[in-house]
Image: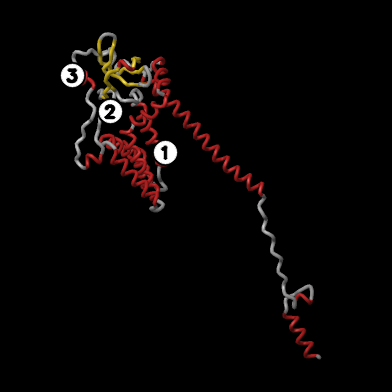
Amino acid sequence: MRPIFVAHRRRRRGAPPSTSPRAVDEPDTPEPPQPTPVPDAAETARVTDGAEGSFIGTAARLGAMGAAFLTGFALVKAYAVANFSLTTGSALLTTAPVSVLLGSLMSYAYWLFPLTAIALFWACRRAGRRGWSGGCTVLLAGGVLTALLSPVRPLLWCTGALLLYLAVFRLPGRLLRDHADGTSSRWTAVGLSLTRHAFFGPQLFFTVALLWLVIASLPRTWVPVEIMRIQDGLEQKFIVGNVISGDGEWTTVLRAGDRGLSRIRSEDVYTRRVCHLTGAQSPGQAPLMWVLIDRPYRSPNLNCQRLADDRPGLPVVEGSFPDSG
């Protein structure tokens, strides 16, 4: 019995300490798995409704801001086109409120295409820093397309303005960063902080460009100039202006010279022809893709003064040309 007792003592002596002798021989009992908590349906619905409400609220705010901007733009545009006359501006806005916006976008096309091309190239460059992707390809293709549709002179002007912006706001910061060290002066630190400020980012260039575009073209009408042969009493005359409304019994014409309104019976309008009035419209220009293939450009619209001079026997309504009223 003694050897058995010794072996038993040795086995017990090498075992880990335990408060109970049976803990050495019995295996550990695994804990029962905890039940997975089931999300409350009401809580899930509340979170979903909150996300949808946030999205709807953001969309509503953006829609309200867009509507306010378009309304303000239409008011300012009609006021400027009317030579800052409240009476004429009110008549323009009430006669054709929708065409103010749509026609103005087309009148900006010569400059919007180059600015859009530059914006797409800039976005492609920034997106390419994180690695080339399908989005970069789409941006690059859009930039090439809008550049090909851009007239050459506006494209060169916009490119030159971008280079000037880079030389003034980007190049100094790059030079200061390359030469900055621990002994840099205070003015170097101030210059670095200014060039890194978010205010001088690329949005400054595009904001100034769009603001200049809108202000420079505010007095220009949103519909083309036309020369019309009309019956005025017992004689026929020419009137040159923009047809604001031509539906129904009356035709409303904004005279090109003094920006006054003439209302003519539609049955008294014999002929209408779109023409080009020097100074009131941008001259026609060939897009870049036509220049690359050496395709000549000829405007389909003749000069308004030339068309009027072809019929010297017909007088022109006063205020039709800028030099006649």
Assign the N terminus to one quadrant of the image.
bottom right
Q: Which residue is mark 3?
A: 310
CA separation in Å, label 1 and label 3: 61 Å
Residue 314 lies left or right of residue 268; in this view the side is left
Q: Nearer the viewer, residue 280 or 310?
A: 310
In this view, which residue lies farthest toward the top?
Answer: 234
Which mark is on residue 119? none
Residue density around tag 2, few if under 14, some if 14–19, many if 20 or more, within 10 Å:
some
Q: Secondary structure at mark 2?
A: loop
Residue 106 lies left or right of residue 34; in this view the side is left
Residue at x 33% of width, y 40% of height? 117
Looking at the rendering, which quadrant does residue 83 occupy?
top left
Type of residue at label 1?
Leu
Provide residue 109's location: percent of width, then percent of height: 33, 33
Residue at x 30% of width, y 15% of height? 268
Type of residue at label 2?
Ser
Q: Nearer the viewer, mark 2 or mark 3?
A: 3
Which mark is on residue 194? 1
Which mark is on residue 282? 2
Residue at x 39% of width, y 51% of height? 134
